[in-house]
Amino acid sequence: MPAVVDEEKCNGCGTCIEECAVECITLEGEGDDAKAKINAEECTDCETCVDVCEQGAISMQEA
């Protein structure tokens, strides 16, 4: 059940990237258009990114 990003809510702040222990999150785009992108194959489903996202932009996807 990998984490997924709601691009409409994501503001590209990067908090999830800083907190991800397995470094599976990157920013795609530049400036105000930057959005978090999660590599589902590397994601360990720890939900840290869900917990730290102040925008509520990350959730766990049903398999």
Image (tube, rainbow, N blue to C red):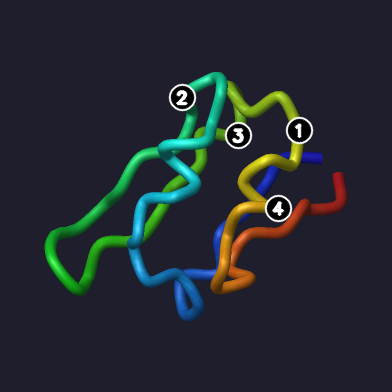
Left/right of residue 40 with respect to residue 59 in the rendered view: left
**Residue 5 horizontal/vertical position (percent):** 56, 59
- Residue with the mark numbered 3: 40
Furthest residue to the left? Answer: 31
- Near mark 1 (Cα within 10 A), the count class, few <14, some 14-19 or many ≥20, is some
Residue at left offset 68%, top offset 40% = 48
- Residue with the mark numbered 2: 23
Residue at left offset 25%, top offset 62% = 34
> Are the residues tagged 4 and 2 within 8 Å (C-beta)?
no
Left/right of residue 61 with respect to residue 21 in the rendered view: right
Q: Amino acid at mark 2?
A: Glu
**Residue 14 horizontal/vertical position (percent):** 36, 51
Kindly report the distance in space between the C-alpha atoms of the residues bearing marks 3 and 4. Answer: 17 Å
Q: Secondary structure at mark 3?
A: loop
Mark 2 or mark 1: which comes first in sequence? 2
- Near mark 3 (Cα within 10 A), the count class, few <14, some 14-19 or many ≥20, is some
Kindly report the distance in space between the C-alpha atoms of the residues bearing marks 2 and 3. Answer: 11 Å
> Are the residues tagged 4 and 1 within 8 Å (C-beta)?
no
Q: Secondary structure at mark 4?
A: helix
Kindly report the distance in space between the C-alpha atoms of the residues bearing marks 4 and 1. Answer: 12 Å
- Residue with the mark numbered 4: 51
- Near mark 2 (Cα within 10 A), the count class, few <14, some 14-19 or many ≥20, is some
Q: Amino acid at mark 3?
A: Ala
Q: Is residue 57 above or below residue 46?
A: below
**Residue 44 horizontal/vertical position (percent):** 71, 24
- Residue with the mark numbered 1: 45
The quarter of the picture where the C terminus appears is: top right
Q: Amino acid at mark 1?
A: Asp
